[in-house]
Image (cartoon, grey):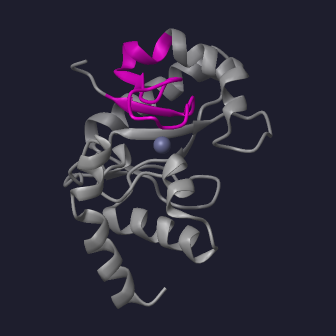
Amino acid sequence: MHPELLDCYLQLCLDPGLPRERGWPLFAEATELVELPPDRWQRIPRLTPAAAQAWQSMQAAAKQDGIVLELISAFRSYRYQAELIARKLDSGLALEAILRASALPGCSEHHTGRAIDLATDDGMPVLEPQFAETPAFTWLQQHAASFGYFLSFPPDNPWGLMYEPWHWCYQPDR
Ligand SMILES: [Zn+2]
C-alpha cells in the first residue's frame, strides 16, 4: 500500500467515532519497550519492562512443568495494526469481517506492550481456537494469574470479539 494512502487510512481509523459507536476501548501506545529473543519468524518481540519480566518468569515456570510456551505476538504499533487491516482490505475482505478478528488501530490491547499471543509446541496452526484444548492452555488457566497475566477475550466477552484463548494481558493490579 502507498505510504500516503496508509497515513490517510491510519488517521481515519484513529477517528474515535467507530470505536465509540461500538463501545470498544482505546489503548495508548507503549512508550517504554524492551526487546525479547527472536520469535520463530526471527522477528524481535517487544513488551514493557514489567510485562517482559513477568512473561519470561512465566515461560520459565511453565518449562519446569514440561510445558512449552512460545511468544507469537507482543507489542504492535498503531501503524502496524493499520497495515494489518489495510492488507486484509486489499485482499478483498469486508471491514465487518476483518473487525471480528482484528482490532482497529488504537483499539488493540497489543498497543499497550502488555498483551501477548501464545502458542505451544504441538505443531498446530497458531492463533486458532484449538489452543484452548492444549495442556499449555490448561497450565495458563491455573498459573498465569500468579504472574499477572489474564485472558482478555473469554467466550461471549462484552466487546463481541472472538474467543481468543491465546491472548493474555499483563494486568498486575487486576
Ligand atoms: Zn492478541
Rendered residue at 78%/33% (across/down): 122
Rendered residue at 26%/42% (across/down): 25
In this view, 55 is above or below 20: above
Q: Quadrant of residue 172?
A: top left
In this view, 124 is above or below 93: above
In this view, 120 is above or below 105: above
Q: How many marks?
A: 0
Question: Considering depth in this image, is 79 or 69 the residue closer to the camera?
Answer: 79
Question: Considering depth in this image, is 158 or 49 the residue closer to the camera?
Answer: 158
Q: How far from the left and from the top, in percent, is residue 53?
A: 35, 33
- Residue sticking out furthest to the right: 123
- Residue sticking out furthest to the top: 142
In this view, 130 is above or below 125: above
Question: Considering depth in this image, is 114 or 155 the residue closer to the camera?
Answer: 155
Q: Is the C terminus in the top left, top right, bottom left or bottom right quadrant?
A: top left
Q: Does the rendering let one see residue 67?
A: no
Q: How far from the left and from the top, in percent, is residue 49?
A: 27, 41
Q: Does the rendering let one see residue 5?
A: yes
> Would you say 69 lies left or right of 113 here?
right
Rendered residue at 30%/81% (across/down): 8
Rendered residue at 78%/39% (across/down): 124
Q: Bounds of the magenta span? A: 143-170
Q: How far from the left and from the top, in percent, is residue 11?
A: 25, 73
> Would you say 65 lies left or right of 26 here?
right
Q: Quadrant of residue 89?
A: bottom right
User: Does the segment drawn in magenta span residue 35?
Assistant: no
> Would you say 26 lies left or right of 77 here?
left
Q: How far from the left and from the top, in percent, is residue 132?
A: 66, 24
